[in-house]
Image: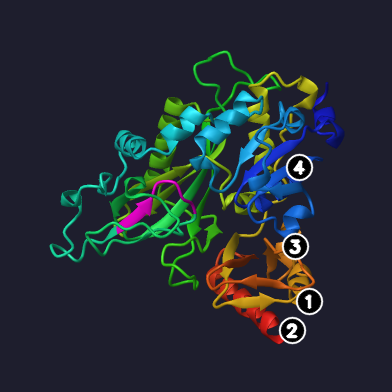
Amino acid sequence: MSRSDAMNPESTPSICLIGSSCRAAAQSAARARCTRILAWDDFLDADLLAIAQARSLADFPEASPEDLADLQGLPLVLCGGMENQPDFVQRRIDQGMRCGVTGDSLRQLRAIASWQRWAFESRIGWPATIENLSDPSTHPSLDSDHSQRWLLKPLARAGGVHIRAFESDSIEPTPGSQSANQWYLQQYVPGVSIGVSYCTDRVLGNPNAQTPDGTQPDGTRIVGIARSIQAEELDAPLPWIYRGSLAPYSVSPSVHASLERFAKIVAQETGIRGLWQADFQIDPQGQLWLLEINPRWSASMELHETLQGFSWMNEHLRIVLAESKTPADALYSVPSPGLPGPGQVAKGILYAPHAMHLSASEIDRLWRSRWHGTLRELETADFCIADIPQSDPLGVDFSEGMPIATLLVAGGKNADLPEEIRQARSSVLGWLKRI
């Protein structure tokens, strides 16, 4: 079978996406020429439903033999929050789905002890951390040094929603969250937060492993680096909630070398394959600190794909399926990079500044500015909108602080993209007030 035949959409296998927000991954799958995109998602946004056969994550068929048989052999791509569900993921693998991680490797990749060890082995910083919160004697003294801030973080949450400043010796989890032993305290490191996306293309422990075209795998590489939008750049309901990202972000040669060294150590110890991500902090002195690892499709991946004109989803699926028994004529091809994109791209989350009711006409106004997931849209429009809620004749209610949509902008290397995001936010809120 020729390489050009492998790119025929009719030979492209289906894909299964699962997590709290699958829209970006689904658009990437469409760019990778997937013709059957299945998704189980918490939000079921309109632009996800436009390109995927999507159902509620709560409705995933745990026991239906008919449904599970339809999923056997499919590549499984993890989206938001699924890195914290190792048992669920392992059941999918046991049922025949293909994934770049296992339940055991997820537990290892999400363990504080692993993060601390890998930071030490990579010669990068690891913030002071306290895991045993059941014993108040281990808590830091709030009176000893007010310059040293501590954060209370959950072990199994995503998006920074539940992170808060540690201000009391009493650990009282928020309603509906986790018990005290599922939280940890970590010293706050000031500076710039970055998300680093990686791709691991090595079948570890098998020196004879080859990719489908007969070439030798080339290990772990950095896909791209994105900077998190900071609190002073964009309003949000909580201090450490995810506001959005800007890419690309340049780091010093020494930091870049540390990021590469870290990734190789993680890949060698865990056997992770395909795409994954890690969060770091760069302090004012330029020191790199590890924060956490997210073995899933990351929020900034669509920015890297847009900038590079390259389907990293395509690459991820090629890697995952190349290590399976999938027939050669069903393997994904690796496209050549497309036209170079703009100098920078960014995404920002529009949160409801107060309780809001969006009418069907207001949601339709959002839809008319939707992002289809192509580069040229961002080059020609002031901004595009994604993660748009489904329209309803009676409208949709949003509580204060709930995410309404995602705003995407692009510009030259010297563009002030956070300002463009703020202007887009003002424009959209203006639409919602006027209609």
> Label for residue 435?
2
Q: Which of marks 2 and 3 is nearer the N terminus?
A: 3
Residue named by callout 1: 361
Q: Which of marks 4 and 3 is nearer the N terminus?
A: 4
| Amino acid type assigned to the residue bearing label 4 in the image | Ile
The quarter of the image holding the C terminus is bottom right
| Range of magenta residues | 151-158
**Pointers 2 and 1 in contact (CB under 8 A)?**
yes
Q: Is residue 375 above or below residue 264?
A: below
Q: Distance between the residues labelled 4 and 3?
A: 23 Å
| Amino acid type assigned to the residue bearing label 1 in the image | Ser
Q: x, y percentage for residue 397?
A: 65, 72
Camera-side residue of 191 and 160: 160
Q: Nearer the viewer's eye, disc 4 or disc 1?
A: 1
Residue under the image location 36 percent in, 46 percent down: 182
Q: Is residue 132 above or below residue 245?
A: above
Q: Is residue 77 left or right of residue 138?
A: right
Residue named by callout 4: 37
Q: Earlier in the sequence, mark 1 or mark 3?
A: 1
| Amino acid type assigned to the residue bearing label 3 in the image | Glu
Q: Distance between the residues labelled 4 and 1?
A: 28 Å
Q: How far apart are marks 2 and 1 (CA)?
A: 7 Å
Residue named by callout 3: 377
